Image (cartoon, rainbow, N blue to C red):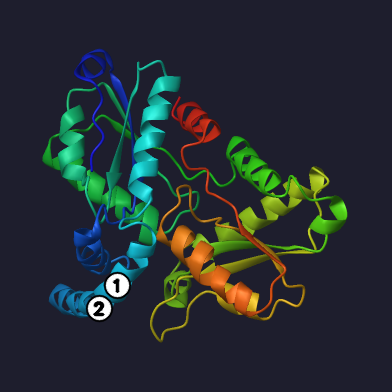
Amino acid sequence: MSYDNKNSSQNLAKKVILLLNMGGPNDLSEVSVFLKNMFNDPYILSVKPDFLRKILANLITKMRTNSATQNYIKLGGKSPINDITKSLCEKTRKFANEQICVDFIMNYTPPFADEVVQKYAKFDEIFLLPLYPHYSQTTVKSSLESTEIALKKHGIKNYKILDIFYQNGQYNEIILNLIKEKIANLNKDEISQISLIFSAHSLPQKIIDNGDPYEAQMKEHAQILSNLLEQNGIKFKEIILAYQSRLGPVKWLGPNTAEVLENLSGKKALIFPIAFCVDNSETDFELSILYKELAQEKGFEYYEVCRCPNDSDEFAKFILDYAK
């Protein structure tokens, strides 16, 4: 799937914002493509030499394709990330009165960088915005590297990389409002009985030990949001930073979100997917289906998952402001 502006807009516009993300299957036939490309990424699977990583990536893909396909069937046969991102591009462009083009690049599924960047080779300004609030080599660096390879291939030098934004006040107000919307029908006493869990994608501990700043930034962001909630008079029973989606026998960042839920004494939890800007299989399947079933098995009285900023008006306006 690719997003194209109207020809008239492309002829007029001299500035384009390219949104970068990991991608997800556009249909069930792309599940194996997604897995294969992801596990062939040296920033995801740091196995050397390259041929050995390729062999291992193919093996993991074969082992996981069937189960992953079943998960995507529960999501309607595809990842939500592509349709939401397309809508976000369209909405952002409208707020810019169509004077700015907005497009997107996915790292592991179409639209890939090569096919997208060549459309904007003659533009005066190209802004690259990875849709990850926090920096990690597994997300921001990987997406930027793939895009910069394509830019170099097409001789494009006039681009600017927009920095991570977890500290940005406008972005954090969006998160605050998403949490407020989810608890709008609850009184202060009810809110005080709920554990707020900021759930982030986990990483192998060795990546952090090698200098990746992801964990430190995640802790800082959780504290920023905790302070913001307190300033707005919103008091949860507790606020917990946890990590989801670990894979394999190596040590991963913790505590694990599923284990936090299993041991939660209050049996009331609100989850916010702090690591993502756009909903994907990790939010719509893992948090909203898999962990919801776990919460039901554990007798939870309350279990809700906040949406990501997605294609909201507020997030579209943030993107425009951030790219000024």
Say left or right for 97 vs 116: right
Q: CA distance from mark 2 to mark 1?
A: 11 Å
Seen from this angle, which residue lies furthest right? 189
- Of residue 56 and residue 92, the one placed in the foreground of this image is 92
| Residue with the mark numbered 2 | 60
| Residue with the mark numbered 1 | 45
Q: How many marks?
A: 2
Give residue 115's position: percent from left, percent from top.
15, 40
| Quarter of the figure that contains the N terminus | top left
Q: Secondary structure at mark 1?
A: loop
Give residue 217's position: percent from left, percent from top.
56, 57
Give residue 28's position: percent from left, percent from top.
24, 60
Q: Is residue 200 above or below residue 319?
A: below
Residue at 27% x, 53% y is 107
Mark linked to residue 267: none
Q: Is residue 72 above or below residue 159?
A: below
- Of residue 317 and residue 307, the one placed in the foreground of this image is 307
| Residue type indicated by callout 2 | Ile
| Residue type indicated by callout 1 | Leu
Q: Please tell me how crowded label 1 is: few (under 14), some (14-19), or many (20+) other residues with Cα within 10 Å.
A: some
- Of residue 52 and residue 174, the one placed in the foreground of this image is 174
- Determine the image quadrant of residue 14: top left
| Quarter of the figure that contains the C terminus | top left
Residue at 35% x, 21% y is 100
**Mark 2 vs 1: CB contact within 8 A:** yes
Residue at 51% x, 56% y is 275
Give residue 152's position: percent from left, percent from top.
16, 41
Q: Earlier in the sequence, mark 2 or mark 1?
A: 1
| Residue 256 visible, this orientation | no
